[in-house]
Image (tube, helix red, strand yellow):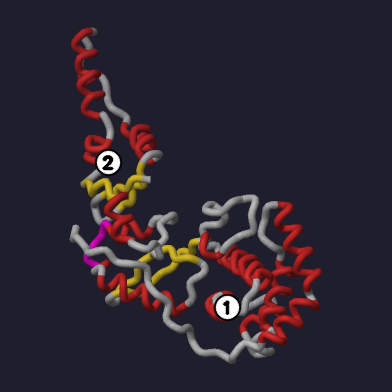
Amino acid sequence: MSEHEPHMAPEPRPAQQRETPDWRRLESATNRFAQLVVDGIAEAHAEGREIDASTARCIAHVLGRAYGRESALAGFGRTGEGSYLSLRDEYLDLYGDERAGTVIKEMIDWLGTYLVQQKGTGSGRRFMNEHLPPKLDQLLIRTSVPVAGQRFTVHIPASWHSGHEDELIELLTTLQLPEDEALQAFLSLPDVNVGTDDIMKSFHEAFAGTYRDEDAALRALSPLEDWENSLADWCIDNAVEPEALDWNYEPLMERLRGIYDVVEGKEVLHVFIR
């Protein structure tokens, strides 16, 4: 495994240029549909779930007023259909604008979380306070990114738009990801945020080793040899042939997986501290 210098999280590039948001129209639509949106969010929050489809479409309709009828958000508001990536980049442009107030940001947090949930590629609420509204930067999305002609699975914050991903590809290329299978395994874990400020520091702190098989992992990371010696002593004390007893490694590996994340690689196991 190669050693790397510390690398910081990618800085966003400007997303694809779109029509300049019309904040006056957005404010007007927000005021007009405020009660519908507030009621839908309140119901979802009270029941501990995501907003329903009608509330999501209403929010998209409101946000779409900033870009006009041909925008992805406006289209989703009308039909309930649309490309997640197109929708994401539109609402994140608004989300990151200094003119976006608390109400706009909260609507986007709810809409973005709903869309990720529909895709089935997100981490859900596991990193969020269950008593507070969702936050996009606390939601991770499983994403496939191309690096040096290959594709790798990583998990990015839902608050990242396509400009961040361009920078991420550059970072992973610099880290020589295609040549580092242990790093690939680490970044594939569903609770690893590739947007962490120093991802290599996190990797080295979590990495517990690469092992040829389960037996090798158990011997390195559990008291297996001590247990074997104790069993051998017991066999001698009780005049039992050692061959009469067989080890069942399955429950031992299950116990190990409760402490470590074990990722299967190419004929090896990569192990990380949880």
Residue appearing at x 57%, y 78% in the figure? 98
Residue appearing at x 70%, y 85% in the figure? 65
Q: Nearer the viewer, residue 14 or 180?
A: 14
Does the magenta-highlighted stretch encompass residue 217?
no
Residue under circle 1?
A: 98
Quadrant in which the N terminus is drawn: bottom left
User: Does residue 61 lie above or below 234 as drawn?
Assistant: below
Could one spot residue 87 in this view of the protein? no
Q: Nearer the viewer, residue 203 or 250?
A: 203
Furthest toward the top, the residue is: 238
Q: Nearer the viewer, residue 58 or 94?
A: 94
User: Does residue 151 lie above or below 61 as drawn?
Assistant: above
Going by the numbered disc 2, the residue's amino acid type is: Glu
Chain part drawn in magenta: 178-182
Q: Residues within 10 Å of mark 2 (few under 14, many from 20)?
A: some
Quadrant in which the C terminus is drawn: top left
Q: Secondary structure at mark 1?
A: loop
Residue under circle 2?
A: 214
Q: Position of residue 109 (x, y in %)?
A: 61, 67
Q: Quadrant of residue 239?
A: top left
Q: Position of residue 76 (x, y in %)?
A: 66, 79
Residue appearing at x 78%, y 77% in the figure? 31
**Helix, strand or loop for the magenta stretch, by majority:** helix
**Which sits earlier in the primary sequence, circle 2 or circle 1?**
1
